[in-house]
Every structure is written in structure tokens, then in C-alpha cells.
Image (cartoon, rainbow, N blue to C red):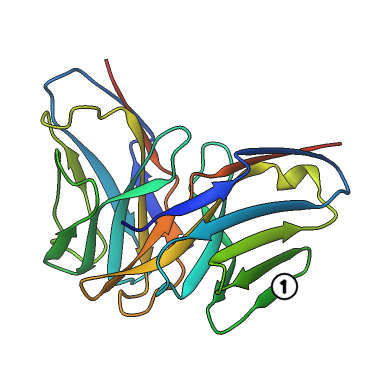
Amino acid sequence: DGGITQSPKYLFRKEGQNVTLSCEQNLNHDAMYWYRQDPGQGLRLIYYSQIVNDFQKGDIAEGYSVSREKKESFPLTVTSAQKNPTAFYLCASSIDWLNTGELFFGEGSRLTVL
Amino acid sequence: GENVEQHPSTLSVQEGDSAVIKCTYSDSASNYFPWYKQELGKGPQLIIDIRSNVGEKKDQRIAVTLNKTAKHFSLHITETQPEDSAVYFCAASVQNTGFQKLVFGTGTRLLVSP
């Protein structure tokens, strides 16, 4: 089945550590996105990638980094510079970035900083 | 900046009743308005969307209406069922340096009681 796979589902981190969240899609979509979800708030865009080897900062990129070396993969690193990293992280993809259309989401990764 | 307000934050109905969730947006250039349903521990899934050249769209028990003049749009669920219980997010598209992104509302937790 086509879809988006995020791992790990749950992750615990000590303060000062970097962690990387994995996102893989087999939908052959060009565009990929990372969102952060906090209780009582909407989804906020961290980074997006329109095509392989290209990515752009979203609304809350500080303390995060990404790479897009392969079309199907868009990992997110939460660095120690992120002041409040505990959140639910969602990866998404869409066919392309030219026309807004359906976003396909993964099941999310919940990061807890101890 | 772009803003999407969503009300109510929680909504409790009896099975068989109708449910209405309302959103307002700030960017008059927005032209795409999707609604996503998020079940517990899962990623959001698109349930219905509407574009600015249409005032209403219906899909079985779900309908969305759009009032571009007032800049608001609504989700209507008729004959609610317990499996409709979830968090619902509205979103509106905004242009951002040639890239269309989605700005999400803060979500509505719908509880349908048997």
C-alpha cells in the first residue's frame, strides 16, 4: 500500500541531544512537509521541500534541520537549539507544490524531552 | 500574517444530530479550503475540500459551505455517528513567495455520544 511512514512513533530525548525523525513515502510525490502539532494549536509548518535537493524554511524552522537527498525521504533533525521540542511531529507529502491539493500525512512521531 | 480561526474548540452531540464547525480566514487571496479529520494517535486525513469558485460541496453526510465575501467556511456533518468522533481541522491556502501553503485552524474535538 502507498503511504507515508514515520519512525519512531515515540521518542524520548534528554536535553542537549539532537534527534532525527524519519519520514519515507512511496507515493512518488514531489513535495514533502514537516508540521509540528501542540495541544490546542493547529498544525504549524516547520520545513517543506518542493523537489529533491531543495528545501525551504516554514513558519517555525528555528532549532530544526532537514535534508532531501532522495525523493522518497525527508528526515527532520530536532537540534538542541530547539527550546521547546516536546511535541507531536507530522510528515506529509503532496503530488507537487504548484497547485495546492491534498496533503497525505503519516501517523506522526511523538517526541518527549526529559 | 495569515490567520485561520476555528470554532468551537469542542463539540458534543448525540448520535443522529447534526454538527457544524466554523472557520474564518484573513487572506482574501485564499482559494483552497480543505477539512481534515484526525483520529487519536493518527495523522490527519482529508475528508472534504472546496475551492473558491464553488459555494458548496457535499459528499454523503458531509458538506462544506464557503462565503468568500465574509471570508468564512463551515463543515456540516449530518446524522452523526460515534465513529465521527475525532478532531477536525480546517485550513486555508495562502501564497508564500510562489509557494502555496496551508494555514490550519486550531481544531475542533467532536464527541458523538450513542
Left or right: A83 as drawn, with respect to B7: left
Above or below — where is B30 with respect to B62?
Answer: below
Q: Please name the residue that numbered disc 1 is placed on.
A: B58
Secondary structure state at the residue bearing disc 1: strand
The total of numbered circles placed on residues is 1
The residue at 53%/67% (across/down) is B71
| x 29%, y 68%: residue | A31
Taking the spot 33% from the left edge, 36% from the top edge, the residue there is A8
* Nearest to the observer: residue A36 or residue B53: B53
Q: Nearer the viewer, residue A78 or B68?
A: B68
Residue A84, x across and y down, in percent? 24, 27
Residue at 52% from the left image edge and 79% from the top image edge: B52
- Residue type indicated by callout 1: Lys
Closest to the observer: B47 or B34?
A: B34
What residue occupies the far front of the structure in this picture?
B70
Q: Position of residue A12 (x, y in %)?
A: 29, 22
Residue B101: image quadrant is bottom left
Q: Is residue B11 visible?
A: yes
Residue A2 in view in this figure: no
